[in-house]
Amino acid sequence: MSGGGHRPFFLESSTTQTIVAWIGIVANCINVTFGVVWIWRHETLISLNYYALAVDILVGLFLADLFSGFVHWATDTWFDELSGGRVIAIAREHHLYPQHIVGYGFADYVAYSSWPTLLVFGPMSLGCAIFVGASPLSLNIVAVCTLVSFVMLFGTYAHRLGHQKVDSKLVILLQRANLLMSPQHHMVHHRDNHDIRYCVVNGWANIVCDRIGFWRFLEQVVYSVTGAVPRAHDHLCFSRFRNDRSFVTKVWWGYGPKLEKTSLSSTHEQRV
């Protein structure tokens, strides 16, 4: 889907939403700063191995891409506006009008990826530094967690770059070198079912995840345990959009199409 102009539908946010967004951003910046300072303070103590750090960088870039895919997959697959509010409304809008992503502001980009990263990699980095102490192992773990947290500060911005023409020679060079996701790589996600190429930092993890069916495996596990239907709400939004394109502007607090669990479950069982 495309069109609709480049002005997003959900630019306005409440005071609470804005505060929560900035808390996540600042907290993740503190998390990154802590990791950098901790590594710097213990460099001489643990005889920093620069070859190991080179490996840490590669691992960190891959994990950051993989984690961006996990957040993207979870948002697209399991939530609706009633449970996720404005964040999920924006995600639904993005599938209907992909170019609208370029119209959102700094806080929306950074907070979306900062909060999940902070909650997952923040405790890992802090816990390792405190309870394991200074050692080659802890250095590598903290270095990887810090790099993932830093990259994810810009994870959604990398997604945005996958939807716009850029003039920056540096960005173009990074995209051509596969260090940033290119629009050509990401456009595949917006075809058909929106169920592949979830990873949006550099696309490295897509090569692995899509080839081995990683996301379908996770979906089958969740469906088997909970009965939740993958992308049920996303499919319903597309169905309603085909009948009434104005409905997406109504997707907001207290509003959301009701899902018929039985029929959706039957449809999913037929697919798998």
Image (cartoon, rainbow, N blue to C red):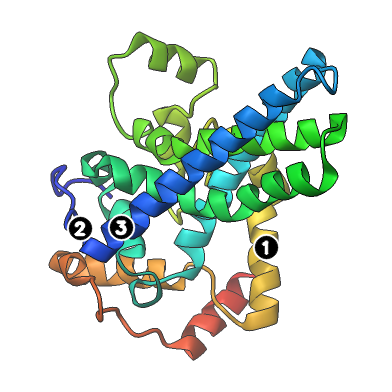
Q: Is residue 182 above or below residue 96?
A: above
Q: Quadrant of residue 206?
A: top right
Q: Is residue 186 above or below residue 94?
A: above
Image coordinates of residue 223 in percent, x first then y, are: 64, 76
Nearer the observer, 189 or 108: 108
Residue in view at x 76 percent, y 25 percent: 42
Residue 195 higher or lower than 180, as above or below:
below
> What residue is shown with label 3?
19
Q: Residues within 10 Å of mark 2 (few under 14, many from 20)?
A: some
Residue position for label 1: 218
Tell me the mark number nearer the camera, choosing from 3 and 2. 3
Query: Which amino acid type is marked by label 2?
Result: Phe
Location of mark 2 (residue): 10
> How many angstroms separate mark 3 from mark 2 (CA)?
17 Å
The mark closer to the camera, 3 or 1, is 3
Q: Earlier in the sequence, mark 3 or mark 1?
A: 3
